């Protein structure tokens, strides 16, 4: 007589989901559980490197690796498909091309771009959300330069790139573009003086929450690279020609631009709401053990989960660092559950620091409480990037995909 | 007392113009004449390699080199500008940013794409006419692949590429695209079965004038690479969505395509007509010594000139081979004129053969009367390409820019 093995289904092979699976496969034996990992693509990509692929400073193949290279095939079954709905009452996940039963479910489907209902953003702006989007942004910008050089009646607005949002993604993308534009000008014989790189941010500050001294450094460095900041300026609408921003109380101003990249917001995944799981803008306020409210068998981690940082009474930001730590905790809790333990571990984020890149050669960071800028911070950023590879795929993945182009 | 030196102005640094200047600078002394070369760009490009840059199989910087690298600065003054009108009665050339007087003028301004008045071609089709156009085509095609992979509601027509014209340029571009498409599919994760490569030709044959046995080989090889031929099919209109072709007597058919490349015609440069010089579709039927009809001081060479091949009573085709030979003859005639000789040399083309590439790995050719196909013809094509470099810039230019990627 064999006992029925519990079925664990993990949705999403981002930082959280892939960490859950790679940790869990080490913790449990082949006979303890069936693990199924579901992901749209057969590869994992480094969300935190997408700004580089979007700018064209790093090839998109450098930011992804095959899922098969990090999972143990005898313990984990990989299904390349997209989850469309979770039927919690039936313990079932509906996929585009099938369905899966589960005993335990991990929702690690990542976030989506949040457009706050701003008109035209969905249609006319790009968002740095995945590999497909990143390479479209790169190709779109290159075509703007190539077209400008080839059109008789030159439209200079083609060479204007607007970045909506001065948060992490916006700033990191601006840093890469600051380096990329001189390359693009050489490649397409375009006068660098014709190119504009504009950052529009509704909030009154750049990188809210970051140390003000570091932020000042970042702004000065990006301005040196040609970035023009329009802070405290809200985008009202995005059009095929550019954006319309609020100017004063009642006036508006048009900024014509060939490229608009929206990098101002992340919300949870829409599958959460579609499945009737209680959420705030798609993010589930999870229990301390990472399970959905009132649920015994559904974990939610990563950008679709929400946890409050009690110290400042604000949610923790949706970062790779936290998603990976949640993945580790989730794996331990799953192992405990299938071994019949009632007591689960409460998740405690361990924020080691935060480094924001300003291009491959510059960065700002607060690491273990220490402020740093320039080459040193940039080196630290690469170490942070390599650490994600190390935690999920070990040293061999770092050797294959790591960043070693130290100054 | 110093005699006034005659002023020679050469318009255009294509095959004909640049050959004229590089030969002439070797033939005459510094005190014999002032030579001025006028060109829009500060570089020369290999028109016959543009199909490769357009397909993305050769970087556009590989198909061009600085004009300064082949001219002797003490004998030739280079002016980067564009000629807008020739005032023959005043012996003057009007440039966009100035004007030049001349005693002898060489018009070597190259051809333009001939659209035969087909509606929408100018607006919606690309033409492989220069470096700027080539890289725009390359970028446009790449963006189609990137966008297809990123759009939710996938438009397969994006992946259709229509080439209008089965002449030399059309066939050579199709050969490159046949090789490039598998690369593009890998790069953008696109299913190769979704891509279509269609050649539409109004004439009832491919490569008119070429040996029928070689043409059959070319068609079979291109079909193996996925090219679909629609021969005897006239394009009626080009739209933002693709093309409309005649089907039978009164019907039309729409072929939707994300990219339309028009490669079906070359005419002379519009500056010829604008300047009131007698021409047929912008091509000047020159005297045997290459001077314009009735003119003592204006030479016309290259694609803007027209000479009849008496053997078949048809014009010689506008090729790099003939343009370069005309450049040599023109240089000798200019040297004769400034030395007061009345007798000028009559131009006699020496057609060594013709090789049509079908991608970097295949070709068809008729060289010194010998038919050849495949690797041998492809090798010969590279030698033809290198010969153009050798004739204009010598061995050092061949070493820098030559093609040596033999199978």
Image (cartoon, coloured by chain):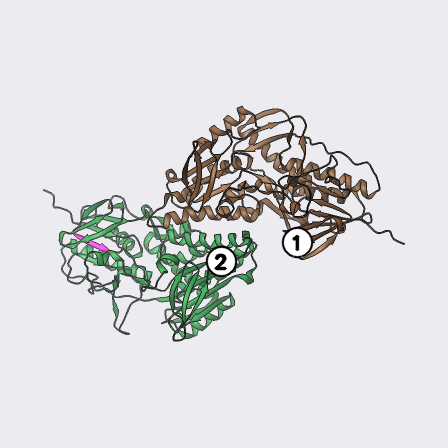
Chain colours: A brown, B green
Task: Name the one closer to the observer, B132 or B60.
Answer: B132
**Mark 1, other Cα within 10 Å: few <14 / some 14–19 / many ≥20:** some
**Mark 2, other Cα within 10 Å: few <14 / some 14–19 / many ≥20:** many
Res. A277 image quadrant: top right
Q: Label 1: which residue?
A: A81
Q: Is residue A170 visible?
A: yes
Residue extending furthest front? A250
Task: Describe residue A245's horizontal placement relative to residue A96 as left or right.
Answer: left
Residue extending furthest left? B1
- Label of residue A4 in the image: none
What is the x, y in percent for residue B403? 43, 55
What is the x, y in percent for residue A237? 47, 41
- Label of residue B158 in the image: 2
| Labels 2 and 1 positioned on one and the same chain | no
Image quadrant where one finds the N terminus of chain A: bottom right
Question: Relative to residue B149, is residue A115 depicted above or below?
Answer: above
Question: Relative to residue A134, is residue B299 depicted above or below?
Answer: below
- Of all chains, the one bearing label 2 is B
Q: CA distance from mark 2 to mark 1?
A: 24 Å
Res. A259 image quadrant: top left
Q: Is residue B379 visible?
A: no
Q: Which residues are drawn in magenta?
A: B102-108
What is the x, y in percent for residue B127? 37, 58
Question: Relative to residue A160, is residue A221 depicted above or below?
Answer: above
In terms of secondary structure, where does tag 2 sit? helix
Task: Describe residue B30's horizontal placement relative to residue A44 as left or right.
Answer: left
In terms of secondary structure, where does tag 1 sit? loop
Question: Relative to residue A166, is residue A91 depicted above or below?
Answer: below
What is the x, y in percent for residue B50? 39, 56
């Amino acid at each position: 007589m064999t006992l029925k093995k519990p079925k664990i289904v993990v949705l999403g092979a981002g930082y959280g989901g892939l960490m859950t699976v790679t940790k869990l496969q080490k913790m449990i034996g082949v006979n303890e559980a069936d693990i199924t990992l579901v992901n749209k693509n057969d590869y994992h990509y480094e969300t935190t490197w997408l700004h580089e692929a979007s700018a064209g400073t790093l090839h998109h193949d450098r930011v992804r690796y095959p899922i098969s290279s990090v999972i143990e095939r005898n313990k984990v079954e990989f299904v390349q498909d997209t989850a469309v709905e979770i039927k919690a009452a039936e313990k079932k996940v509906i996929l585009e091309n099938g369905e899966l039963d589960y005993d335990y479910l991990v929702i690690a489907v990542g976030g989506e771009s949040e457009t706050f209902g701003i008109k035209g953003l969905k249609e006319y702006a790009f968002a740095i959300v995945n590999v497909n989007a990143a390479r479209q942004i790169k190709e779109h910008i290159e075509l703007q330069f190539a077209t400008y050089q080839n059109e008789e009646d030159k439209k200079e607005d083609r060479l204007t790139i607007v970045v909506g949002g001065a948060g992490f993604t916006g700033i990191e993308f601006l840093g890469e573009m600051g380096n990329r534009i001189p390359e693009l000008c050489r490649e397409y014989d375009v006068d660098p003086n014709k190119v504009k790189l504009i950052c529009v941010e509704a909030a009154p500050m750049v990188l809210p929450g970051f140390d003000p001294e570091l932020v000042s450094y970042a702004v000065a460095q990006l301005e040196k690279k040609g970035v023009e900041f329009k802070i405290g300026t809200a985008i009202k609408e995005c059009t095929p020609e550019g954006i319309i921003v609020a100017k004063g109380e009642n006036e508006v101003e048009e900024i014509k631009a060939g490229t608009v990249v929206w990098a101002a917001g992340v919300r949870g995944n829409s599958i959460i709401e579609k499945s009737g799981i209680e959420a705030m803008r798609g993010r589930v306020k999870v229990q301390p053990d990472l399970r959905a409210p009132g649920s015994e068998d559904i974990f939610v981690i990563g950008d679709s989960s929400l946890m409050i940082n009690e110290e400042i009474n604000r949610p923790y930001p949706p970062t790779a660092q936290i998603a990976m730590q949640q993945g580790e905790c989730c794996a331990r809790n799953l192992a405990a559950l299938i071994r019949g333990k009632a007591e689960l571990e409460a998740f405690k984020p361990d924020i080691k620091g935060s480094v924001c890149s300003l291009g491959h050669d510059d960065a700002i960071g607060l690491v273990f409480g220490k402020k740093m800028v320039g080459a040193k911070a940039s080196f630290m950023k690469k170490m942070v990037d390599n650490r994600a590879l190390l935690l999920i795929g070990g040293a061999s993945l770092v050797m294959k995909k790591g960043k070693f182009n130290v100054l």
